[in-house]
Amino acid sequence: METQYSLFGRKIAYKWIVLSVTTIGSLMAAIDSTIVILGLPDMMVKLHADLVSMIWVIMAYILVSTVFLLTFGRVADILGRVRMYNLGFVIFTIGSALCGFSGNATQLIIFRLIQGSGAAMMVVNSVALITEVFPPNERGKALGLNAITFSIGGVAGPILGGLILTLADWRWIFFINVPIGLFGAIWGYRALREMSIRKRGEKFDALGAVSFSASLTALLIALTLGIEYAFTSTPILILFGLFLIGLAFFLWWERRASNPVLDLSLFNNRVYNFSVLSAMIQSLALFAVNFLIVFYLQGVRGYDPLKAALLLIPLPVATSIIAPLGGNIADRIGARIPATIGLLIQGAALIWFMQLTPTTSLFNIGAGLALMGIGGGLFYPPNTSAAMNAAPKNRLGIASGTLATLRQAGMVTSFALALAVAATSLPRDVMMALFVGTNVALGSAPMQAFVTGMHSAFLVSTVLVFIAAGISCVRGKEDRSALAKEHGAVVISE
């Protein structure tokens, strides 16, 4: 029998309560990811900061929110997912308030680290909480609805950012998170209840967590500093070496640890293995696309940051429309077909973008972005649903953490790729100014050079997306009937 929750005298299925709480977290994260980038020029001027500091305002958040995903996923499996998720809401809200009160760039970077740690706690547990309460034949729909909120946040972010920067200063970009975060935290503490069983006999694998976090940190710092310095410079090569050594030690240790932070047996499941791999390659291929399009709109077309961000709206709108459909299809026939079709559509969008010129019409740009959004809506919910359906119920936290970590590692690598491409086509100071949102209109020669470099990046992304589509297609068919029986047995036992 499905658990009911009493709200204002009405009975509501508990799964919808969980979805409402995780949706608030998604909305807050989506708004924050867009709105902060818009505010970078104002921050740089009023905090008397340089471009490198502004890069770290972005990268500090990405670094922490990526590095700790696996660790927090494992901790959640031991201590409880609801506890970790609610704590993440609180820490993210506190970090947002501290960011708003920052007196200089150094303080802002430190407080972004705090904000990022809270985000990691929410991100890693959000999908796990949804998976825990929704039956396998409804998880795609639930994740699709969650994706709508993230897309709405992607639209609301530029609009709110433009209004805030017009009427107030950059501090309110962070303060706006506080009321949303307080509401989400209070609602979470009141409405959510722990359904996972605490693993009292299991110990936390501290050595595994430290070695993984250190190696991934070395990789992300190398990718970030490689933008500022040459990727072949000695310090960057040393960081890449530390990453490889740390990763090799981590994998060696995890095979021997009694309670590993990464359960390598997850990768024995073909569906989980290929779903995670396709998600990582898709992120590697496509996260750079948004940045390259923004660079194109600002540097080549000469639009201000707000207009450039608003012109991206067809992408999240298309995603929000298609994501529930993609989730519903996956609930009926499995993830393989809709996810693979979604990746092929995104590959077609990249081929479309390879035709961009300095005079391409805005309609054609918007059509390409809409096509990209349609493909994303068909890929994200089904693929995530397939990965989480394939994970053991007592390992949802670490399964979600692994998926999110590899996906975000792909994003960061793609992000570095986008800036590296821009750096080969433009003077470094111009590229950095474009990155932080300063309106820089390029001359005709640099303009054409950037467009040529952008086409090369899109070609690489196209190849990667088609590889991801191939992996998605051969992931194997999910046993939907077995999943439904497993969920029914769990509900009865509860």
Image (cartoon, helix red, strand yellow):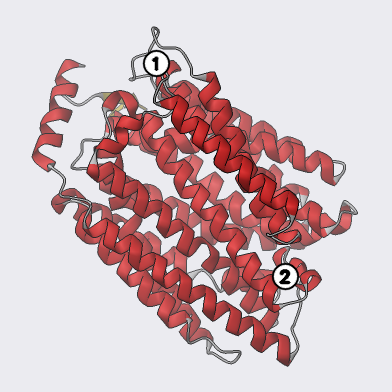
Quarter assignment of residue 4: top left
Q: Residues within 10 Å of mark 2 (few under 14, many from 20)?
A: many
Residue 457 appears left or right of 374: right
Amino acid at circle 1: Ser
Q: Position of residue 433 (x, y in %)?
A: 77, 68
For residue 62, say whether it is visible.
no
| Depth check, front residue: 295 or 157 | 295
Decide: is 152 above or below 241.
below
Badge 2 marks a residue whose secondary structure is: helix
Relative to 330, does residue 16 appear above or below in the rendering? above
Residue wearing tag 1: 258
| Viewer-proximal residue among 3 and 444 | 444
Considering the image in quadrants, where does the N terminus appear?
Answer: top left
Q: Is residue 363 visible?
A: yes
Q: Nearer the viewer, mark 2 or mark 1?
A: 1
Position of 3 compared to 403: left or right?
left
Estimate the x, y position of residue 35 in percent, counting from the top left. Answer: 64, 56
Task: Measure how far apart labels 2 and 1 are at the Cα level.
Answer: 49 Å
Please name the residue shown 62% across and 71% down the image: 421
Name which quarter of the figure residue 130 lies in. top left
Report helix, strand or loop for mark 1.
loop
Report if the CB atoms under discs 2 and 1 are less than 8 Å apart: no
Image point (57%, 29%), residue name: 211
Q: Which residue is mark 2?
A: 434
| Percent x, y of residue 51 | 81, 59
Q: Position of residue 367 (x, y in %)?
A: 43, 80
| Label 1 environment density (alpha carbons within 10 Å; few <14, some 14–19, many ≥20) | few
Three-letter code for the amino acid on which mark 2 is drawn: Leu
What residue appears at the point 26 percent right and 47 percent down from the top-left corner? 140
